[in-house]
Image (cartoon, grey):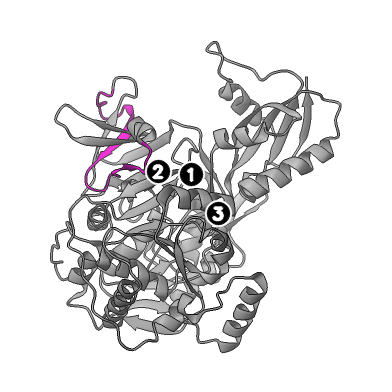
Amino acid sequence: MEKKEIISPNCSSYDYLLENNKKYMDLTALTWENRKISYEELHDRIEKYAKLLYKKGIRKNDVVGVCLVNTPESVYLLYALSAIGAQVVGFNLFDTKEKIKRDIELTRPKMIITVDMMYSNFKNYEKALDFSSILYSPLSSSEDKKLRAMYKMLQLAKGNFKFSKSGYLEHLIKEDIFDDYEKSSYVPGELTDIMFTGGSTGIHKGVDLSANGLNYVVSGMNSIFEAEPGMIHLGNIPIGHMVFGRMIMHFSLCNNMQLALTLKAMPEDFYSELVRTQANAAVGGPIHWVSLIEEINGEFVPSSRLKANTLQNLHYATSGGEAKKATTDKAINDALRFCGSDAKLGDGLGATETWSTVIASNGRKNTPGTIGNAISTSKIKLVNPETKEEVKKGEKGILCVSGPQVMLGYHNNPEETEKVLFYDEDGTKWCNLGDYLVELDNGEYKYVGRQKRNFVSGVDNIYPEQLETLLITLPEIREAVVTAISDEMRQYIPSYHISLYDMNIDYELLEKKIEKLVISKLGVNWLPGNIEYFDTPLKRMTNTKVDVTYYEARDKDLKKEKTLNLSK
């Protein structure tokens, strides 16, 4: 294997990409349906998109919102904005109009570039919040004319359209001549991206990040995985609003791999996309990997829909987003072997506040049951949460991270920033990620748990405090505490413990109200797997806080399906 040239990460994400790609312009950079896009074409398109955006008035430090899906146009846009030096705000495709409005008010973008199917979430705010917009179709690059026509008719019916062609990226990019643009000069540590997170508390925050931080993470990931030019990486994790997806995109392309873009990012499509793309490497949440197995007579086994020797090219399989479960690991690895893969499922840990990955395991090398080693560019320590003193190997401590990848702070939110960022006596900035880990003698780490209460259900991060605040807006509910029921396929399912003012009510009607409220504000994955009702205030500890551990203990005796427990 040819020794890689070391490129300095202290530059824009586009310059880092360009420097790493210069010797590999003839290789395939992106695949999309049946199309193959070379690195030469990728950079030609980025330059053209940068000129287009510059012509539309985008300049260095302008705030530009993006609401993207994993298509070639999205990749071109992200790097073009980096080349200009704009500050990119990632809007979540799955957020409600209410959440979108709040995020626009917080970040005040000059322009928003969005897939047309999400335009209804933005168009009513354009005048009031003073931004322009450009739309593009996720099927712009599709060769299926019939599908494109059907999609266009659907968006017209939903009102996701503009009357002027000048509002469409597809029309604008067809112009043959663009004036050159002023390429940004990069300043290390300057704000380049704002991504949103609920962190460990559920308090919605914008995270201010710097491009050289992303470059450092990508550089550090090379100490864990042997990425080689020409390898295929599945591009299923959203690149627009998730740091995890953005990092995978940047890691793949800066290592001159093929990024196999797909719109089929849900667990039910994971196996078929692995087969279709013949990926050499893939990342998913635990829920993606458990889609390869099923439960029969209380035992987890490879799914009956798998076919032998269909994943012979898959060498690296990594889980992230939530701790994977030991109870399903063996069956997942058995499924991979059945499909002809020599991969062993690895794990990792990271955060939006650190541009994604901090620690990662290569399943083929690291000890099973660990989350692996710190990436080479991560400076980490485990500390006692009370004293902030570093703990010894073998002792449990809170993970703290330092380095360029650490966020600049929460956007316009110094109060929340001060809760997680701190400086040691040498003036080094550290970020408290709120995860309990143990460092082993061999330098690997074991995950212990969260300092806070959030958990993952399906593909959603669930923040109990946020859900509890929502539930008590219903007049029937006096108090509520939300805990997590372990579930092998969805990781965890919310369990509601509700104190009512009056037990003599129509429970069916109340639960319909709860369902409607939760789906409208948060989403279906926040719905309960169990509801337990009480006619007295919830049990409290001596410090007057609700005794969450008491209700977590009660969950252990509950079935996973929804039940009605009238407890007095």
Q: Is residue 443 above or below residue 88?
A: above
- Image check: 112 left or right of 504? left
Check if residue 194 falls in the magenta segment.
no
Res 95 label: 3
Residue range of the region highlighted in magenta in the rendering = 388-413
Residue assigned mark 2: 369
Q: Earlier in the sequence, mark 3 or mark 1?
A: 3
Three-letter amino acid code at the position of disc 2: Gly
Find numbered disc 2 in the image and state the secondary structure of the residue it sits on: loop
Residue assigned mark 1: 326
Q: Is residue 458 above or below residue 11?
A: above
Query: Is the magenta region chiefly helix, strand or loop?
Result: loop
Query: Could you say which quadrant of the image residue 313 lies in?
Result: bottom left
Query: Could you say which quadrant of the image residue 447 lies in?
Result: top left
Q: Is residue 135 above or below residue 381?
A: below
Residue displayed at 56% across by 14% down? 544
Percent position (x, y) of residue 46?
A: 30, 75
Residue displayed at 48% across by 67% down? 114
Percent position (x, y) of residue 107?
A: 41, 51
Q: Is residue 355 visible?
A: yes
Three-letter amino acid code at the position of disc 3: Asp
Disc 1 + disc 2, Cβ < 8 Å? yes
Three-letter amino acid code at the position of disc 1: Ala
Between residue 180 and residue 407, name the one nearer to us: 180
Residue displayed at 46% across by 32% down? 452
Q: Is residue 67 visible?
A: no
